[in-house]
Structure formats: structure tokens, C-alpha cells
């Protein structure tokens, strides 16, 4: 009886230890007595948590320990900066890796983790896509659209395969890897508003399995922001809107003074997004100067947000002698103001009445003047 109790206690202790750790063992050819790194990926950052020198035959192992509240995580097993394997490691995993260290991403095999195995499959597809796009890019000829068409076809084929995986495996963290994958030039495979349903599918599905995961919490926030932007875009989509209150903008002007859009309540305001490097924006300003001078005495104001860097913006203000409110945060397309108003192209403008309500979008020339006249009455 005593021996049985000792066996049970030992089994419980062993089970407890295995549930708070995971093991990664590997063997890489062409990596004799070199250092392999284990890097944990956080949301927006990463940290090398361990390193080990391989044996003469390229073998190595890591013991990944989990704190009591620590969630399963993505890890990189790295030989160097651009030569690595992506894994998703959970408690109790016993992962085995094999590969050629000289071409790790394309050669490695992983077992012991279904999610990591699926990540490998997706990585292979991504690498083939990137290689094809690089090859086609070298064939570009000015005036020949056939290469662009082929590149688009390669991209779409990859995205379709990723979509197929996401839809059939919405509770797998490999789907998270897929939806945040990129091709060269930091181009996201997903991320347009047409993809919002895939983000929702993953946010809802992964939340049932990994509710406390920082990755999933971040994904839910990302989806919520996309949904909010879409709602805002729908509200701002038509040129004439019955009445929609506008979000606040607070940016410094060209003199370094902070100006709030709400401070202009009581006036009819044209909120205008532009870039002095954009010919259409510059031409638009020439026409807008006349409209501004004609109606500013009746309570009309222009709140113009530049999506350019500082020097060309200041030069354009001086060259065109702009007298209205000129503001910029020098963040270009990443400006929170542009994102808040769902600005996808320039010039883009919004007409706001005296009560601070949105009454028109993308009004130019005579159409703008007629609408200004209407709301000034």
C-alpha cells in the first residue's frame, strides 16, 4: 500500500512538472558546435530567453519553463537573424526539429506539436510565394503590365490557401500566424477591410481556447478597431450625410500651437486632408483660396491636415500663402487623424456645420461652394 501511495505521489509530481514545461530537441546539419538561440515573441516585442551550443553532430535542446499564469507562446529557434524556425509551444510539448542550418526555413521538419507543424506548412507556402514574387519583380519592364498581373496572381493564390486554412482551423494559433504574415516591403497578406470577417472569425474562435493569451487579446482589439473604422467609413461613405457628429482632432499648427477641431464649433468648417507633394492637392488649394476668401467673413473656416513631412509642408504654406488653419503631426498616412476619418486617398475633405455635425464629404469646386452657401444660411 505504501509503495502504491509513493508511486501515485511520484506520478502527480512528474505530471505537475511536465505541465509547467516543454522540451525542444533538435539536430541541424551544417551547424557544428555553433550557438542556437531561443527567442520568445511577445505582442510588439521579442526576447531571447535561452541559448545553447550544439554538439559536434549539431544536436541541441531547450527546456522551456512556464510560470503559473504564463500562456502558450510563439518562439523562434534561431541560427542567425534571418535563419530561424517559428514554433508555437504549449505546456507538455515535446518538440523535435531537424533541418539544414544553411537553409533552415526551407528544410526543417518538426514533430510533437500540431500547431508548429501547420506553421511549417504555411511558412513553406509563404516562402515559395516570396521567392516567386522576387523572381517576377526582376522581370519588370516599364509599360508591360503582364508581370504585374502574374505577381497579383501569385499573391492571390497564396492568400486563398491561407484563407482556406483559417476557415477550416479557426481555433489554431497557426491561423494567427497566417493572418499576420507579410511578404517583402512589409506588405500584409491580410489587413484590408475586406478581410474583417476573417479577423472576427479568429477573434471569436481563438477566444474560446486561448482567452487569456496576449496574442488573442491583441487580436480582439485589432478586430474591434477594424469594425469601428468600418462603421465610421460607412457613415462617411456618401457625399451628403444627414447629420453625423465628428470625432475630435487635436494637432499642432505650423507655429507649434495646439489646435482642436472642436474649438471651431459655431463655424462652418471644411476638414481637409492633403499632401503638398500631390498635384491634385496643390491645385485644389488654388481653388479653395478663392472660396475661403469669399466666405470666411460669414463664419467659414478651413482646418487643413497635412499628410507630409515638415519641410515640404511649411514650404507649401509659404508658397501658396495659406491663411487658414494648417496642422500636421508629420506621420503621413499613419496619422491618427487620417485613420480616425478613414482617409484612403488624398485630397479628401469633410464639411462640418455650425453644430459640429458632418454634412458632406469630398465636395469640390461648385458643389463645395453650393453646400457651404446652404449651411451658412
Image (spheres, rainbow, N blue to C red):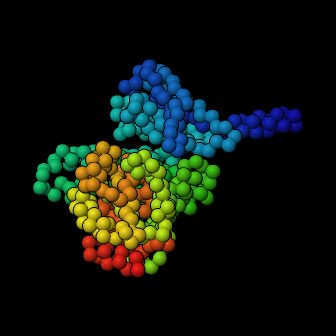
Which quadrant of the figure has residue 359? bottom left
Camera-side residue of 233 and 125: 233
Camera-side residue of 36 and 233: 233
Q: Kindly identify the residue that appears in the image at 72 percent across and 39 percent down.
A: 16
Camera-side residue of 288 and 220: 288
Camera-side residue of 205 and 252: 252
For the C terminus, give its image quadrant.
bottom left
Describe residue 149's horizontal placement relative to residue 67 as left or right: left
Q: Kindly identify the residue that appears in the image at 33 percent across and 64 percent down.
A: 348
Which quadrant of the figure has residue 283? bottom left
Whether 179 is drawn above or below 268: the answer is above
Q: Kindly identify the residue that appears in the image at 34 percent across and 30 percent down.
A: 102
- Image location of residue 360, percent across then percent down: 38, 73
For the N terminus, give its image quadrant.
top right
Q: Is residue 78 visible?
A: yes
- Image location of residue 225, percent across then percent down: 50, 59
Q: Kindly identify the residue that appears in the image at 51 percent across and 48 percent down.
A: 115
Which quadrant of the figure has residue 271? bottom left
- Image location of residue 145, percent across then percent down: 16, 58
- Image location of residue 197, percent across then percent down: 46, 65
Whether 72 is drawn above or below 170: the answer is above
Amino acid at each position: 500500500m505504501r509503495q502504491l501511495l509513493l508511486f501515485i505521489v511520484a506520478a502527480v509530481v512528474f505530471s505537475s512538472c511536465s505541465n509547467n514545461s516543454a522540451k525542444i530537441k533538435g539536430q541541424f546539419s551544417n551547424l557544428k558546435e555553433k550557438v542556437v538561440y531561443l527567442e520568445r515573441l511577445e505582442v510588439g516585442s521579442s526576447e531571447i530567453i535561452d541559448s545553447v551550443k550544439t554538439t559536434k553532430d549539431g544536436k541541441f535542446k531547450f527546456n522551456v519553463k512556464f510560470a503559473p499564469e504564463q500562456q502558450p507562446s510563439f518562439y523562434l529557434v534561431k541560427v542567425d537573424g534571418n535563419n530561424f524556425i517559428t514554433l508555437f509551444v504549449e505546456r507538455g510539448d515535446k518538440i523535435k526539429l531537424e533541418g539544414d542550418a544553411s537553409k533552415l526555413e526551407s528544410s526543417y521538419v518538426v514533430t510533437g506539436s500540431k500547431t508548429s507543424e501547420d506553421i511549417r506548412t504555411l511558412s513553406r507556402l509563404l516562402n515559395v510565394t516570396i521567392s516567386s514574387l522576387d523572381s517576377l519583380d526582376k522581370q519588370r519592364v516599364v509599360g508591360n503590365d503582364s508581370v504585374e498581373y502574374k505577381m497579383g496572381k501569385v499573391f492571390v493564390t497564396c492568400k486563398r490557401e491561407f484563407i482556406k486554412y483559417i476557415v477550416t482551423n479557426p481555433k489554431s494559433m497557426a491561423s494567427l500566424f497566417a493572418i499576420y504574415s507579410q511578404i517583402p516591403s512589409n506588405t500584409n497578406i491580410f489587413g484590408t477591410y475586406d478581410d474583417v470577417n476573417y479577423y472576427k472569425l479568429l477573434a471569436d474562435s481563438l477566444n474560446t481556447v486561448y482567452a487569456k493569451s496576449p496574442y488573442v487579446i491583441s487580436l480582439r482589439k485589432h478586430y474591434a478597431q477594424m469594425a469601428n473604422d468600418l462603421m465610421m467609413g460607412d457613415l462617411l461613405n456618401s457625399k451628403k450625410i444627414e447629420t453625423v457628429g465628428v470625432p475630435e482632432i487635436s494637432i499642432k499648427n505650423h507655429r507649434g500651437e495646439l489646435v482642436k477641431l472642436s474649438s471651431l464649433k459655431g463655424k462652418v468648417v471644411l476638414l481637409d486632408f492633403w499632401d503638398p507633394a500631390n498635384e491634385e492637392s496643390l491645385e485644389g488649394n488654388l481653388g479653395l483660396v478663392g472660396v475661403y476668401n469669399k466666405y470666411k467673413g460669414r463664419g467659414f473656416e478651413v482646418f487643413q491636415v497635412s499628410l507630409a513631412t515638415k519641410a515640404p509642408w511649411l514650404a507649401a504654406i509659404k508658397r501658396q500663402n495659406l491663411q487658414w488653419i494648417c496642422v500636421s503631426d508629420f506621420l503621413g498616412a499613419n496619422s491618427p487623424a487620417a485613420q480616425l476619418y478613414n482617409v484612403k486617398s488624398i485630397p479628401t475633405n469633410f464639411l462640418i456645420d455650425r453644430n459640429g455635425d458632418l454634412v458632406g464629404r469630398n465636395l469640390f469646386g461648385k458643389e463645395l461652394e453650393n453646400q457651404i452657401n446652404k449651411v451658412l444660411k
